Image (tube, rainbow, N blue to C red):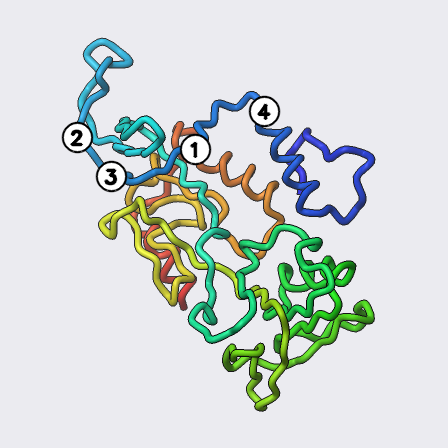
Amino acid sequence: MQYRDVPFRDDLPSFLTHEDVLEYLEDFSRGIPINFNQTVENVERSDGQWKVPLIEGHPKKKRFQVTTHHGTGITEQLFDIVFVCNGHYFEANNPYKTNDFHGTLIHSHDYRKASDYQDKEVIVIGAGPSGIDIALQLSETAKRITLISRKATYPTLPGNVTQISQHVKKVVEEGVETDDGTVISADTIIVCTGYFYKYPFLGDNILRVKENNQLVSPIFEHVVHADFPGSLFFIGLNLVTITFPLFEYQVKMALAFATGKAPIPDRNTLIDYEKNQIE
């Protein structure tokens, strides 16, 4: 998972915890001019010019006007190129958000540490990467963990982790009910059912999310906006990948298009990529 020429510390284990990865990213980002504590409110095309032209007589052309909100107010800036790197792990897909559960129900997005569930009985819905990671961490602190998913078929798990290969039909007052009518009780439910793509700062005239929130459109090769192939790029859309090396190569691809080092495909090729993916 490491970036090129920036290795993880030698003393770290082969299987990294999320705390290890966070520390790696914090170390990697030191010195990079990141404007934290700002919310991007809007990104749109604009005919505006720079207040101070970069070059005398700089020609007027469409740019992206980016509006941000921060502690001191609203800021509007013009940019020639925009990289959208907000990822797809912040808009939780929680089909059980509306419920009558008497305990605590959260999405995996809000899970932080296993010690918060000391001696608790916990249901984990979903057995993908987040579900199994959380279940294994909880096995060291929680009293009992029930991992429920049609994918819950792991061969070996700690003794206090029970697997149920069922779909959760609904959340009830005492816990959950599976498709076969079985009711499992718990103090806490952690929902690990993934995320939706979401871009609240981009209007429908620029970007659309289709196919049940699983397809960002119109994007070429998961990176390049088909309408603005030299100026609007998306990093990290892919769901199943080795993340950081992929991001690095996606940025290189985008920069090659933006600087003219790589030829931009013709319009038909850009548009047809999405159609071919759906088919």
- Amino acid tagged 4: Arg
Residue shown at 59%/52% (left/top)? 241
Q: Is residue 80 above or below residue 177?
A: above
- Amino acid tagged 3: Glu
Label 3 packing within 10 angstroms: few (<14), some (14-19), many (20+):
some
Residue shown at 45%/68% (left/top)? 97
Kindly report the distance in space between the C-alpha atoms of the residues bearing marks 3 and 4.
30 Å
Residue shown at 50%/46% (left/top)? 236
Marks 1, 2: nearer the viewer? 1
Image position, residue 256 (x, y; %):
45, 32
Q: Which of marks 1 and 2 is nearer the N terminus?
A: 1
Kindly report the distance in space between the C-alpha atoms of the residues bearing marks 3 and 2.
10 Å
Look at the numbered disc 2 and give the secondary structure of its residue. loop
Q: Which of marks 1 and 4 is nearer the N terminus?
A: 4
Residue 210 in which image quadrant: bottom left
- Amino acid tagged 2: Asp
Marks 1, 3: nearer the viewer? 1
Residue holding disc 1: 37
Residue holding disc 3: 44
Residue 73 or residue 7, whichever sits in front = 73
Kindly report the distance in space between the C-alpha atoms of the residues bearing marks 4 and 2.
35 Å
Image position, residue 48 (x, y; %):
18, 26
Marks 4, 2: nearer the viewer? 4
Image position, residue 224 (x, y; %):
39, 44
Residue 175 or residue 253, whichever sits in front = 175
Where's the C terminus, which quadrant?
A: bottom left
Residue holding disc 4: 30
Q: Earlier in the sequence, mark 1 or mark 3?
A: 1
Marks 3, 2: nearer the viewer? 3
Q: Earlier in the sequence, mark 4 or mark 2?
A: 4
Q: Which of marks 3 and 4 is nearer the N terminus?
A: 4
Image position, residue 112 (x, y; %):
62, 50
